[in-house]
Image (spheres, grey):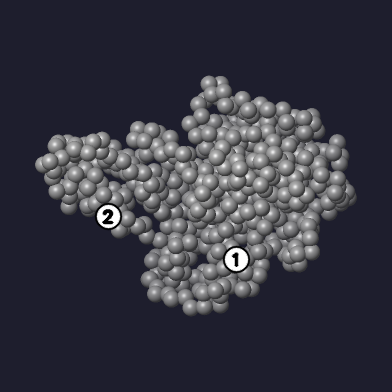
Amino acid sequence: MSLDEKNPAYHPESLPLPGDTRPAKSSSALKSFRKAILPIFLLTQAFYYFGLDETIGLTGRGDGGRGLDAVGAEADGGLCYQHEPLWPKTDFYKELDKVWKSDAFKDQAVEWLGGAVRVETESYDGMDEVGKDGRWHKFQKFHDYLEKSYPLVHKHLKLDKVNTYGLVFEWTGSDSSLKPLLLTGHQDVVPVEKSTYDAWIHPPFSGHYDGTYIWGRGSIDDKSGTIGIMSAVESLLRANKDYTPKRTIVLAFGMDEEVSGFKGAAHIAKYLEDTYTPKFGSSPFGLLVDEGGGYTKAYGKPIAALGTGEKGYGDVRMTVKTLGGHSSVPPDHTGIGLLSLLVAHLEANPHKANLTRSNPFYSTLTCAAEYAPDVNTVLRKLIKASAKSNKALGLLETFLDSRGEYRSLVKTTQAVDLIGGGIKVNALPETAFAVINHRINVASSTEELRQRITSIVEEKAKELNLTLSSFGKDVLTHSGVGHVELTEAFDKWLEPSPLTPTTKSTNGWKVLSGTIKGAYASRLKESDDDDEDDEIITSPSIMTGNTDTKYYWNLTDQIYRYNHLTEGDMYTYSGIHSVNEALKAVAFVNNVRFFGGLMLNVDSAEL
Ligand SMILES: [Zn+2]
């Protein structure tokens, strides 16, 4: 979970100071790193752990009144219903797949992705508006590259540029009554720190191909997605220049996902709502696939983990204001001392775990219990029992909460990440502050977070004889030794995302998970050490970070975060957002095949 923190190349360059409204540079990079790879990692780790653990010490809790209606998976025929593989059966497709599997196409794919890596598209925290900040101009070079590399896409699809550098392509379908498919990704990449250049095996913007891997920043995150989608369309049109999809396909690529998407996806979302809502009503898209999870072999079974929910986000600033004075006659606690006591009280009262059956991680567990042969027997029984028994669910929750690596998936986390106060060694500090970062449980909300932190701080503030105001409201008003104030820090507060429905009858889930199964079963295998098992299980999973999809909630309830990649295809585990990001060429080709197959499959699917 903190692999990037272990990496010496990964140090925050600057911390925000009081009054600075920008989050630390490291936080967005870290968040995106986690978002991109954590679901796979956790899945693997979960199985790893569960397989080893022969004796689960379970001291359970009561029923907790959480109800049994959240998932209804049992009623759907199993804890983790699996759809049939879905792969186009047309002659057109057969010809196309021959092309995709040819050496010539692999060479072409290497050139496409490598070329895209060579066009540096770093985004930075604190970039000013497009038009004011010259650093956005580099995206024009990327657009030029796309235009040169994908002539058929530019000839056959309608292109609109949103806020100058956001890209929206429409491939207009022949049946205008069908809700479009939306495929999204981002053009920007996390900056490479100059001091780490020497640590790269091949330079970070070389796009070098060593015969196996394509090297460089963005080769995975997220040019493998953005370029993968563009390559799929171009190759469809190369195979048949008259090909027109029945269902409209829209491609949307922001240019600042790594710094929260304020200038890119936020504008694109509005454009898409304005353009497609009049035609298709609210929720105008049938299916949305953005970057996110991937697949992995875990405890005897390949499993694809599709992000179907994201935790929420909130930074709280806690400020303690006290009278200043000379340090030679101090009170029992200075402002810094009072702040420390409040921080200690918060840490003594972590958020409680709340594992609901609608939590996507719960679905990951049930899919594992159902299909992964090497999951620990006791745990498998517990997970299966928890589908119907609240007591078993409580035991499972207790177990997960007792393990640091899973705790964050079943509760709101709090982390005091910034602190400051005092200006002179012989003067009592008049102000001291801390900022507490929260990732909000999918079963909770920003409002619940505000209420809870207020009540925890209130307990201690009373004891310390402090007045308290919390998010603009006075809570404790008697006069005291000082004042504590809770406010929203930064401008990144976010509710947990809506959870994507994935029942047996959910059409988006059916076509997407069928496509993944089809793509996996027919995948291009690189060597004979490739897994013999051609069946892959598809499972919902949770994202602990946020993608551009946070702006797209109004576009459809069928939002999935997934790239058809596996960690074994990436050069090193810490490669994303760090040194030595590299992706196997064969994996990139398989990702192109996945997107191409999806474009064809949605034509004959209901959405
Ligand atoms: Zn990304």
| Closer to us: 589 or 387 | 589
Question: What crowding class fits label 2: few (fewer than 14 Cα within 10 Å), some (14-19), or many (20 or more)?
Answer: some
Residue at 62 percent across and 34 percent down: it is 121
For discs 1 and 2, the disc positioned in front in the rendered view: 2
- In the picture of the structure, the residue carrying the numbered disc 2 is 345
Q: Nearer the viewer, residue 372 or 443?
A: 372
Is disc 1 placed on a helix, strand or loop? helix
Mark 1 packing: few (<14 Cα in 10 Å), some, or many (20+)? many
Decide if residue 477 is on the left or right side of residue 206: left
Disc nearer the start of the sequence (1/2):
2
- Front-most of residues 337 and 521: 337
Q: Residue furthest front?
A: 198
Residue 216 in percent (x, y) is at 66, 43
| Label number found at residue 367 | 1
* Whole-number angstrom distance, CA of label 1 to CA of label 2: 38 Å
Mark yes or no: residue 232 visible. Answer: no
Q: Secondary structure at mark 2?
A: helix
Give x and y (percent) for residue 482.
18, 41
- Residue 329 figure quarter: top left
Vertical arrangement, residue 586 with respect to residue 112, above or below:
below
Q: Position of residue 242 (x, y in %)?
A: 86, 36
Residue at 52 percent of width and 51 percent of height: 7
Q: Is residue 38 visible?
A: yes
